[in-house]
Amino acid sequence: MRRIVPYAAAALVAVVATPIVLAQGGSAPGAPDKTRVTAGTYAADAGHTMVVWEVDHLGFSKYTGIFGDVTGTLVIDPKNPAAAKVDVTIPVAKVTTASAGLTSHLLRAGKDGGKPDFFGAAPADAKFVSTSVVLDDDGDEAKVTGNLTLNGVTKPVTLDVDFHGAGVGMNKKETVGFEAETTIKRSDFGINMGIPYVSDAVELEIHAAFEKQ
């Protein structure tokens, strides 16, 4: 997966850090072992699932933000992983960046009642619903295609997904985790402010954990 830039990594640590002290010599409950995955319906762990976005700023640097509190479901059967279904909702109104001013700009109303520069003061949730899953030969990676609805526009998007790990989490629930990435054009979703000074291309990196219901 693409390396996250340092300030994004720091933000991720702040979001996912959990006050848990493991016994010395212990090991993480999750491991990249597909045999640990059992069939069923899993719910997104909202506290540990996020969409990291990155744009190029003026050709000088990359700028990153995060959508968190993702909710939704994953239906999966390890005997037929290509039939997996994912349906997740991303609350755009909870977007966060390293700059309070930029975060406010993303969510402020349009001037004099006009169209907002970005999402506006009361943005609708974004949503991704899968339509197909194509696995590689060893089953560790997949291309997951689905419909992404953002800013009132729905477009097909394909995610490059890696299996990250599975096991029983700290709350005693079976948990599976994945990483995914893709690139979208924000202009496709009617978000045109600042192009080309701020890139049209938006790189998305998803970190997702799902708990069995």
Image (cartoon, rainbow, N blue to C red):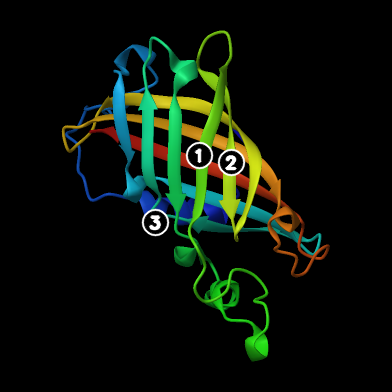
Left or right: 208 as drawn, with respect to 29 = right
Q: Where is the N terminus found, in terms of image quarters?
A: top right
Element on which disc 2 rests = strand
Q: Amino acid at mark 2?
A: Asn
Find residue 14 and name its label: 3
Residue 119 percent location from the top left of the image: 59, 69
Figure quadrant of residue 150: bottom right
Q: Residue at x 39, y 31 (%)?
A: 177
Residue 37 percent location from the top left of the image: 32, 18
Query: Local crowd at mark 2 within 10 Å, few (<14), some, or many (≥20)?
Result: some
Compared to 105, does 197 lie above or below?
A: above
Q: Amino acid at mark 1?
A: Val
Q: Where is the C terminus found, in terms of image quarters?
A: top left
Element on which disc 3 rests = helix
The answer to whether residue 115 is seen in the rendering is yes
Q: Amino acid at mark 3?
A: Ala
Instruction: Choose between 49 and 29: the one closer to the eye.
Output: 49
Instruction: Choose between 47 and 150: the one closer to the eye.
Output: 150
Query: Local crowd at mark 3 within 10 Å, few (<14), some, or many (≥20)?
Result: few
Q: Which residue is mark 2?
A: 147
- 1 and 2 marks in contact (CB < 8 Å): yes
Query: Which numbered disc, 1 or 2, marks the residue that appears first in the sequence?
Result: 1
Residue 199 percent location from the top left of the image: 77, 58
Q: Real-space Cα distance between discs 1 and 2?
A: 5 Å
Figure quadrant of residue 30: top left
Left or right: 71 as drawn, with respect to 113 = left
- 3 and 2 marks in contact (CB < 8 Å): no
Q: Which residue is mark 1?
A: 129
Left or right: 122 as drawn, with respect to 28 = right
Query: Which numbered disc, 1 or 3, marks the residue that appears first in the sequence?
Result: 3
Q: Real-space Cα distance between discs 1 and 3?
A: 28 Å
